[in-house]
Every structure is written in C-alpha cells, then in structure tokens.
Image: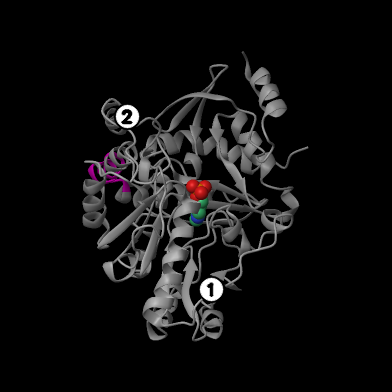
Amino acid sequence: MNTQEFIQIEEEYGAHNYHPLDVVITRGEGVWVYDVDGRKYLDCLSAYSALNQGHVHPEILAALVEQAGKVTLTSRAFRNDQLPLLYKELSELTGYGMSLPMNSGAEAVETALKIARKWAYQVKKVPRHQAEIITAAGNFHGRTISTISFSTEPLYRDDFGPFTPGFVTVPYGDAEAVAKAITPNTAAVLLEPIQGEGGVIIPPAGYLKKVAELCKQNNVLFIADEIQTGLGRTGKLFAAQHEDVRPDVTVIGKALAGGFYPVSAVLADKEILGLFTPGEHGSTFGGNPLAAAVARAALRVIVEENLVQRAAELGEYFAEQLAEIGSPLVKEVRGRGLLIGVEMKKEAGGARRFCEALQKRGILAKETHEHVIRFAPPLVIDKATIDWALPSIRAVLNDRGA
Ligand SMILES: *Cc1c(COP(=O)(O)O)cnc(C)c1O
C-alpha cells in the first residue's frame, strides 16, 4: 500500500482528533524516519520530545525485548524486580527521594494534583475540598477533564465542560500575578519551565526562581511539569535547573522511556509523596516491569551518551544558525538546548505551510500554536546532520509562497 491508501483508511476509520502531516512512517533509526514510499526524513519533532534518545535506540530495544520475554505485567498487587531498581536509579539521577510511576503524562500531572491536594489537607491544614492550585495561561498539561479545566486554549476546552473546580489561572511569566493569586488555601503552583505546546515560550529570566521563593514563603508547593522540557531536552537534566530551582514536585514522562512505551512519573521527596496510602491512587499498568526495564535503559542512555551536554551544545549551534538565516518572514528564533521555536510573522500565513514545505525537503517539523515551527530533533543528532538540514530550512523560511 502507498501513502495515499494508508491515509484514506486512517481518515475513514479513525477519529479525526489530529491533523498530521501526510507522511506515513514505517521505520525509524536514530534521528531518521522512513515512509512507506521509501523516502527518508530527519525527525525534528521527536514525538514531542519523547524520542530524546532517538528512534529504536539499540540499548533500549534490547532491554525491552529481554524484559518482554520474562514478565511484562504483574500489576501492583504483586511486586516485580524492575520497579524497585527504577525507583532507586531515578532517585540517584534526579535527587528526589521518591517517585510514583504512571503511564501517560496527563496521568502523572493528575497524580501531582492529587498529592498536592492531599498535602494541603494533611500538612498545610487547608479546609477539606477547598484547596486551590495556581496555573499559568497558555499552559499544556494534558487532555484529561481536569487538565483541560485550567487550559486557556478554547479548542482544548470549549465543548468539554463542566470543568473541575479548584484552579486559578494567572498570566505566564509574571511572578507578581502568582503572588497576588496566592491565598491561605493555595496548595500549589503548577508551571511548565518553558511552555512547549504554548509555542516554545521562555519566561523572563528570574521568573522560576521568584515563583519558587514565593512558594516557599507562603507554604505552597511548586510543581514543575517537565514532561516535555525534562530529561535533557533543554541542555539541563531539568529546565528549572537553568535558574537553579528545585521544585517540590517534578513531573516527567515522554523521554522517560525513549519512545518505546508510555511511562511517566511524579518525583518528590518523602514528606510529600510519602503521604499517599494504599488504595488512594494507582494504575493497573503504572510501574509494570516492562515499563520499568525500558525506563531504566532510557535513563542509562541519557547519562552514557551525555545527551544533556549534547543538547546544550548542539542546541546553541542550531539556534544560532537558525537566527542567522535572517528571513524577513521570521519574527523570532528562541530556544533552550534542542527545544527551539521559530516564530513566523503573522503575514507569513501560518507555520503549517512551512512544515509542509520542509517535509518535501526531507525534514519533519510540526507547527505549534499556528505561527511557531518547533525544531526539537532527538538529542543524538550531530552537527553534520544539522548542517545537512540548514540549507533546506533556509530555503523554506525564505519562501514567500504563492
Ligand atoms: C505532552 C505533555 C503532557 C501530556 O503528556 P501525555 O503523555 O500526552 O498525556 C503534559 N504536559 C506537558 C508539558 C507535555 O508536553
């Protein structure tokens, strides 16, 4: 079957909750993917940063295959011999005393919200069911009813109410607004250190530090959603570290399993995560041995291959080169590490057509928020590959179109 035939079947039988580029991928290796018609593309999206380690990383593949032949699922009704080691290795890598495994990112965010509420009632002594959580405009924390309840994107929420109460939204990047929104009932502030889906929005310098201080002063938890920014993407293990901030709770997902498997986790110290008691929260698949084995290998690859450092160095180079293109259609190039957004001017006609033009030249990128093209290749990319891509990107960004 060719590309058009696959697309036709997909459109006929699948719900249309995405608007993908018309490329049907059949194989991936490192930074490259191949479509069913034999064309080769540089992946500049990395499945929204789930593929920091690159496609089908051999070490993670080996761990997956080995574990799949032993035992894949025990449920948490029984223990398995992979999860304890994942806990320990996560703690050693991140410095948090405990973690709680889930599957999707949205589930891990939900978990963080639940533990923040429990902390508010048990520790801070907020009157029961009155806890408030402060979130930022332009956020993306997933697609569940609760996480869209504090979305400010009409498309994500307009037809999906009624919403979960208990959330307050303030402008992103404005620490004063957070200060004003804090009340005696505030349990937590939930933020992305950089808003990925929001259009690669980098807050003003000092923002995260200021929010962390406010949280400390007011006995409020600081929850960082590092599902997209974490595990090396921005040139630090966590993006909050660019401001030397250690949030009380950090949520990770995506690259935690190198694209092989949905694995997410909430990281925090014992005083917080230790508050959960048996039965209060759980997941049939969360922490299963296959997930744990894959995540352990994915974390090893991040460390062994120095992916954090690579992201810092190559990201700086890539962003510099993108800025040097100097296209009159580009409003701004911004980024941290290998999370780079190229914002097109409004008159350029939307980022989508540039992504389609890049696809024709063998580069897969995706528009985010209408006017921004995100460049976030796997962190295993090398300089030669960036140099290969730059002339095509230059040609596309300068193309005024029809
Ligand atoms: C992708 C993402 C999520 C949701 O993760 P899923 O695995 O799609 O549920 C949440 N927060 C951020 C910042 C993300 O980028």
Q: Amino acid at mark 1?
A: Ile
Q: Was residue 303 drawn as part of the magenta stretch in this picture?
A: yes
Earlier residue among tags 1 and 2 = 2
Q: Position of residue 275 (x, y in %)?
A: 33, 68
In the image: residue 282, left or right of residue 135: left
Q: Was residue 375 drawn as part of the magenta stretch in this picture?
A: no
Which residue occupies 45% across, 29% down?
A: 32
**Mark 2, other Cα within 10 Å: few <14 / some 14–19 / many ≥20:** some
Q: Is residue 55 visible?
A: yes
108, above or below 135, in the image: above
- Secondary structure mostly seen in magenta is helix
Q: Which mark is residue 231?
A: none
- Identify the coloring: one colour
In the image: residue 304, left or right of residue 191: left
Q: Which mark is residue 61?
A: 2
Q: Which mark is residue 134?
A: 1
Q: Position of residue 24 (x, y in %)?
A: 58, 25
Q: Is residue 170 visible?
A: no
Mark 1 residue element: strand
Question: Which region is colored magenta?
Answer: 297-307
Mark 2 residue element: helix
Task: Give the camera-side residue of 326 and 268.
Answer: 268
